[in-house]
Image: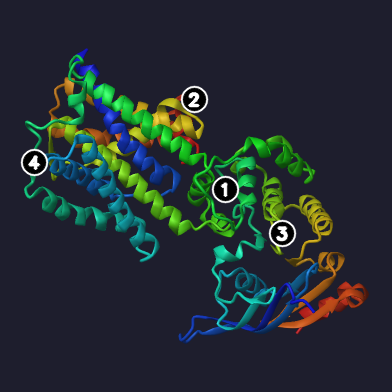
Amino acid sequence: MNLITSAIGQGLLWALLGLGLYLTFRILNIADMTVEGTFPLGAATAVTAIVHGASPIAAACYAFLAGMLAGLITGLLYTKAKIDSLLAGILTMTAAYSVNLRIMGKSNVSLLGHATLLSGFSGLPQYFDTVSLGLIVIIIVTALIVFFLQTDYGQAFIATGDNPMMARSLGIHTDGMIIVGLAVSNGIVGLCGALIAQSNGYADVNMGIGTIVIALASIIIGEVAFGELTLNQRLIAVTLGSIIYRLILLAVLQLGFSTNDLNLISSIVLAICMMLPQLNNILHIKEPFLKGVKTHD
Amino acid sequence: MTEPMLKLENVKTIVNKGASNETTILKGINLTINDGDFITIVGTNGAGKSTLFNVISGNLPADEGQIYHNGADITTMSVEQRTNFLARVFQDPKVGTAPRMNVAENMLLATKRGEHRYLVPRKLKQNMTRFTKLAASMHNGLENRMTTATGDLSGGQRQALSFLMATLKRPDLLLLDEHTAALDPHTSRSLLHATNERIHQDHLTALMITHHLEDALTYGNRLIVLKDGQIAADFKGEEKKQLDVDKLYEYFED
């Protein structure tokens, strides 16, 4: 039971990563590699801030801003310098590695002895602190994204990803939309890094490796599991997908795999989910199960 | 005397500038468009019809010459800024609408063409009755599909929606780039009828490119023949009414 509670807590915290990537990957139609650098950037910023005396909440805000800055750089490289979006993300991600080392001063910084966001939930049973923190943050962030997407600005944002040529012909500044989208998306990813670091009790310069796969897994598992949904429901499905992903990992670890195998397992899980539409053509797996993957992909 | 709605002065566009295959597409276009003009444009492939539209909309720069809107020089104005007074419908139904957004959402986007969009609730419900009524004016069942993603509409419905969106917020100038060419003959004709109806009702100023000489003669008060990057003929009013297909066809023979 404890393990399951822990997996749910982790799933909730990591869901932020999926939500952040959803804005670029699904709405703007950009595969943004920046997140692999933004996630540890958020962690490094938050941990360094806490070690230097900042409050855990302020540290999370700094991480959000640091993430936004990284997204802004990728956005400018992509829209203004006309560098391919994938490459622009890789450039920022690679640069972030050095920046993260500069911020932390070494490759691993511990939060031992410092208060974190989880300290506020110390009265709860084991792992329920992560669940509570995760729930609060996810509800706030999801609500803000839902509100954002239903505004005039948010609708123009969706249109930019859906049909950039039409968006421009309606006077929407698509470059600006893409820059804002990448900045907000990476801000959320930075925030996620800050929360995970506070939950783990440390930041490590290598903790970004494989994060894009984890984010994609939340998005795609959510789509495969819940089928055709409205946009708002899809956002909730990302969080549920993230929890399901953690439960899958838990099950796999119970089979005797080690945590060193996690990146391999993550990739296999994601690959299987993404292969489902193709497999269905060959094997005729039942239709409703697949609706989510097929539409809008 | 007020300034003309749109005026092109000796507009030239050059592609592959400086390269060995440098080509001048528009070779000095002089065109004055007055308020209320409905101009049909015909010409051979490569005559520069689409280039003319791209230069007016700002998608292509005018390498030489000036463009004026109500007397103001807009030659270097960006595409986004020009959408404030200019709307366009493309030939490809896929270009004019956002496929994953539904019909009503697409229309809502169009109501704010060329305007700043703020972080305020979009107010879709409040507009629904108006949008449904507008959709019904296209006579193709679009009003029953208001919450359908536009990607799931037929080409005809999608193009009718593109046209509605272009006219939802009244444009000073409407550019129709063979907007019925990708549709079957029946759907094409009914959209053309609806187009004509709307242009007359709202007294819109419009340019319409077409390859159908009959349509070019039937619709509008003015007809322009583009040939080799230049205006070969400009028929107005009575002159246009006297014109027939055979006479017009002569411009297409070398």
Task: Provide the chain ID for the residue under circle 3.
Answer: B
Q: Which residue is drawn at 40% across and 52% down?
A: A180
Q: Which mark is residue A288?
A: 2
Nearer the viewer's eye, disc 1 or disc 2?
Answer: 1
**What's the amino acid at mark 4?**
Val
Res A262 seen here: yes
Mark 2 on the same chain as mark 3: no
Kindly indicate the quadrant of the structure image that contains residue A290: top left
Q: Which residue is disc 3 drawn over? A: B181
Using residue A91 as the reference point, say whether residue B157 is left or right of it. right
The total number of labels drawn is 4
Q: Residues at badges 4 and 1 in contact (C-beta under 8 Å)?
A: no
Q: Residue at x 35, y 50 (%)?
A: A183
Q: What element carries label 4?
A: strand
Callout 3 environment at 10 Å: few (<14), some (14 to 19), or many (20+)?
some
Residue B202: x percent and y percent? 80, 57
Q: What element carries label 3?
A: loop
Q: Which residue is disc 1 drawn over? A: B98
Using residue B218 as the reference point, say whether residue A17 is left or right of it. left
Mark 3 on the same chain as mark 4: no
- Check the image and report above or below for A105 versus B248: above
Q: Residues at badges 4 and 2 in contact (C-beta under 8 Å)?
A: no
* Residue at mark 2 to residue at mark 3: CA–CA distance: 38 Å
Nearer the viewer's eye, disc 4 or disc 2?
Answer: 4
Mark 1 on the same chain as mark 2: no
Task: Provide the chain ID for the residue under circle 2.
Answer: A
Q: Which residue is disc 4 drawn over? A: A109
* Residue at mark 1 to residue at mark 3: CA–CA distance: 20 Å
